Amino acid sequence: MKKILIVDDDADLRQVMQTILTEHYEVKEAESKEEGFKVLESYKPDLMILDVMMETKSSGFEMCREIKNNPELKNIKILMLTSVDSELNIDFQSEVGDKDWLPVDDYIVKPVQPKPFLEKVEKLLN
């Protein structure tokens, strides 16, 4: 069974995503960048769903860069979860995959809609 790690500071949203995913995947969660790295030490997920803004407005950006620059973690797929494209006027669509600025595999905008969310997860894991 494929493994997913959800890193988001919103407990309700983590629960919603976990409910959507647990039928098909093994899921763990963390509420911060620091906790996410602790979970990564023992749980090597196939996919990480990562919020942009947690402790700071850039925690998610920092975490994805650290993961992609770590030889042991760089192959983990990252699905960035965000609402900052509208808040900060960032065009995520054109930036996804930029190895220096936004080294994620895909992104999804909040609020999470179950069907498109599950479709993106399945695409990244297949």
Image (spheres, rainbow, N blue to C red):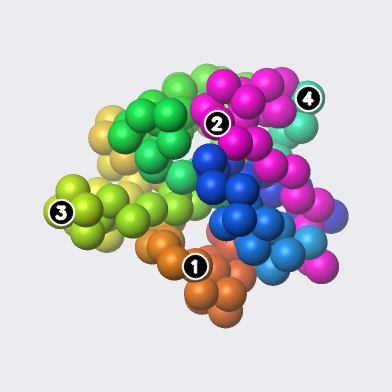
Q: Which label lies toward us, 4 or 2?
A: 2
Q: Are marks 4 and 3 in contact (CB under 8 Å)?
A: no
Identified at 38% across, 62% down, the residue is 109
In which quadrant of the rendered image does the C terminus lie?
bottom right
8 or 124, which is in the foreground? 8
Q: Is residue 100 magenta?
A: no
Picture coordinates of residue 122, whole percent (x, y): 63, 66
Identified at 57% across, 79% down, the residue is 115
Q: Which label lies toward us, 4 or 1?
A: 1
Answer with mark 3 or mark 1, whichever residue precedes in sequence.
3
Q: Are marks 4 and 2 in contact (CB under 8 Å)?
A: no
Answer with mark 4 or mark 2, whichever residue precedes in sequence.
2
Q: Residues within 10 Å of mark 3 (few under 14, many from 20)?
A: few
Q: Which residue is mark 1?
A: 112
Q: Amino acid at mark 1?
A: Val
Cα distance in 3D space between marks 2 and 1: 19 Å
Q: Which numbered circle lies on residue 32?
A: 2
